[in-house]
Amino acid sequence: MQYAQLHTRYLEIYKIRYLHRVQSYDYAIYLNQKARSEIKWWRDNVATYNGRSISEIMGLDNWQFEIYTDASILGWGATLFKSGKSISKTGGRSG
Protein backbone atom coordinates (compact mmCIF):
# COMPACT_ATOMS: atom_id res chain seq x y z
CA MET A 1 0.00 0.00 0.00
CA GLN A 2 1.42 3.33 -1.06
CA TYR A 3 2.54 5.58 1.86
CA ALA A 4 1.74 2.90 4.45
CA GLN A 5 5.19 2.92 6.04
CA LEU A 6 4.94 6.66 6.61
CA HIS A 7 1.89 5.99 8.77
CA THR A 8 3.64 3.61 11.16
CA ARG A 9 6.81 5.53 11.89
CA TYR A 10 5.36 7.84 14.55
CA LEU A 11 3.58 4.94 16.26
CA GLU A 12 6.88 3.04 16.52
CA ILE A 13 8.72 6.08 17.90
CA TYR A 14 5.89 6.74 20.37
CA LYS A 15 5.94 3.11 21.55
CA ILE A 16 9.72 3.09 22.02
CA ARG A 17 9.69 6.35 23.99
CA TYR A 18 6.83 5.13 26.18
CA LEU A 19 8.55 1.81 26.90
CA HIS A 20 11.79 3.60 27.71
CA ARG A 21 9.93 5.74 30.24
CA VAL A 22 7.93 2.98 32.00
CA GLN A 23 10.53 0.20 31.57
CA SER A 24 7.84 -2.46 31.29
CA TYR A 25 5.46 -4.06 28.83
CA ASP A 26 2.85 -4.40 31.58
CA TYR A 27 1.29 -0.96 31.04
CA ALA A 28 -1.39 0.23 28.66
CA ILE A 29 -0.18 2.86 26.22
CA TYR A 30 -2.48 5.84 26.00
CA LEU A 31 -2.22 7.24 22.50
CA ASN A 32 -1.88 10.96 21.90
CA GLN A 33 -3.67 12.74 19.06
CA LYS A 34 -0.89 12.21 16.51
CA ALA A 35 -0.75 8.45 17.20
CA ARG A 36 -4.54 8.24 16.92
CA SER A 37 -4.41 10.11 13.62
CA GLU A 38 -2.04 7.45 12.22
CA ILE A 39 -4.43 4.69 13.26
CA LYS A 40 -7.28 6.68 11.75
CA TRP A 41 -5.32 6.90 8.49
CA TRP A 42 -5.10 3.09 8.42
CA ARG A 43 -8.81 2.75 9.17
CA ASP A 44 -9.73 5.18 6.41
CA ASN A 45 -7.27 3.97 3.77
CA VAL A 46 -7.33 0.20 4.05
CA ALA A 47 -10.92 0.28 2.85
CA THR A 48 -9.90 2.14 -0.30
CA TYR A 49 -6.98 -0.21 -0.86
CA ASN A 50 -8.88 -3.49 -0.98
CA GLY A 51 -12.51 -2.44 -0.77
CA ARG A 52 -13.07 -3.68 2.79
CA SER A 53 -12.39 -2.04 6.14
CA ILE A 54 -10.29 -3.69 8.84
CA SER A 55 -13.31 -3.79 11.14
CA GLU A 56 -15.33 -5.57 8.46
CA ILE A 57 -12.56 -8.11 7.83
CA MET A 58 -12.05 -8.78 11.56
CA GLY A 59 -15.75 -8.69 12.43
CA LEU A 60 -15.29 -5.74 14.79
CA ASP A 61 -18.16 -3.35 15.36
CA ASN A 62 -16.01 -0.68 17.00
CA TRP A 63 -12.35 0.18 17.52
CA GLN A 64 -12.02 -0.79 21.17
CA PHE A 65 -9.55 -3.64 21.18
CA GLU A 66 -6.05 -4.43 22.41
CA ILE A 67 -3.07 -5.87 20.56
CA TYR A 68 -0.35 -7.69 22.50
CA THR A 69 2.97 -8.37 20.79
CA ASP A 70 6.16 -10.13 21.79
CA ALA A 71 9.45 -10.95 20.08
CA SER A 72 12.65 -12.74 20.99
CA ILE A 73 15.58 -14.41 19.30
CA LEU A 74 13.45 -17.56 18.98
CA GLY A 75 10.34 -16.03 17.43
CA TRP A 76 7.52 -13.52 17.54
CA GLY A 77 3.81 -13.36 18.17
CA ALA A 78 0.77 -11.11 18.39
CA THR A 79 -2.71 -11.53 19.82
CA LEU A 80 -5.75 -9.34 19.20
CA PHE A 81 -8.21 -9.01 22.08
CA LYS A 82 -11.72 -7.58 22.08
CA SER A 83 -13.60 -7.19 25.36
CA GLY A 84 -10.88 -9.21 27.12
CA LYS A 85 -11.30 -12.17 24.76
CA SER A 86 -8.65 -13.34 22.28
CA ILE A 87 -10.08 -13.15 18.77
CA SER A 88 -6.96 -13.58 16.60
CA LYS A 89 -3.37 -14.84 17.00
CA THR A 90 -0.34 -14.95 14.76
CA GLY A 91 3.34 -15.71 15.17
CA GLY A 92 6.39 -17.43 13.83
CA ARG A 93 9.89 -18.63 14.47
CA SER A 94 12.99 -16.56 13.76
CA GLY A 95 15.47 -17.74 11.22
Image (spheres, rainbow, N blue to C red):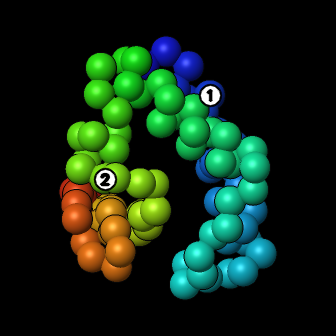
What is the spatial separation of the Cα atoms under label 1 and label 2, in whole angstroms?
25 Å
Q: What element does badge 2 sit on?
A: loop
Q: Residues within 10 Å of mark 1 (few under 14, many from 20)?
A: few
Does residue 26 appear in this view?
yes
Q: What element does badge 1 sit on?
A: helix
For residue 61, the mark is none
Location of residue 94 by image quarter: bottom left
Residue at the (25%, 72%) spot, across then down: 86
| Disc on the earlier residue, 1 or 2 | 1
Residue at the (22%, 65%) spot, across then down: 87
**Which residue is under mark 1?**
6
- Quadrant that contains the N terminus: top left
Does residue 16 appear in this view?
no
Q: Mark 1 or mark 2, which is nearer to you?
A: 2
Location of residue 49 by image quarter: top left
Q: Nearer the viewer, residue 15 or 66?
A: 66
For residue 60, the mark is 2
Residue at the (63%, 69%) spot, across then down: 29
Q: Position of residue 9 (x, y in %)?
A: 64, 39
Amino acid type, label 1: Leu
Residue at the (77%, 75%) spot, across then down: 21
Q: Residues within 10 Å of mark 2 (few under 14, many from 20)?
A: some
User: Does residue 68 lie above or below 94 as drawn?
Assistant: below
Q: Position of residue 47 (x, y in %)?
A: 38, 25
Amino acid type, label 2: Leu
Q: Position of residue 73 (x, y in %)?
A: 36, 65
Location of residue 82 by image quarter: bottom left
Is residue 90 shown left or right of residue 63?
left
Q: Position of residue 52 (x, y in %)?
A: 29, 28
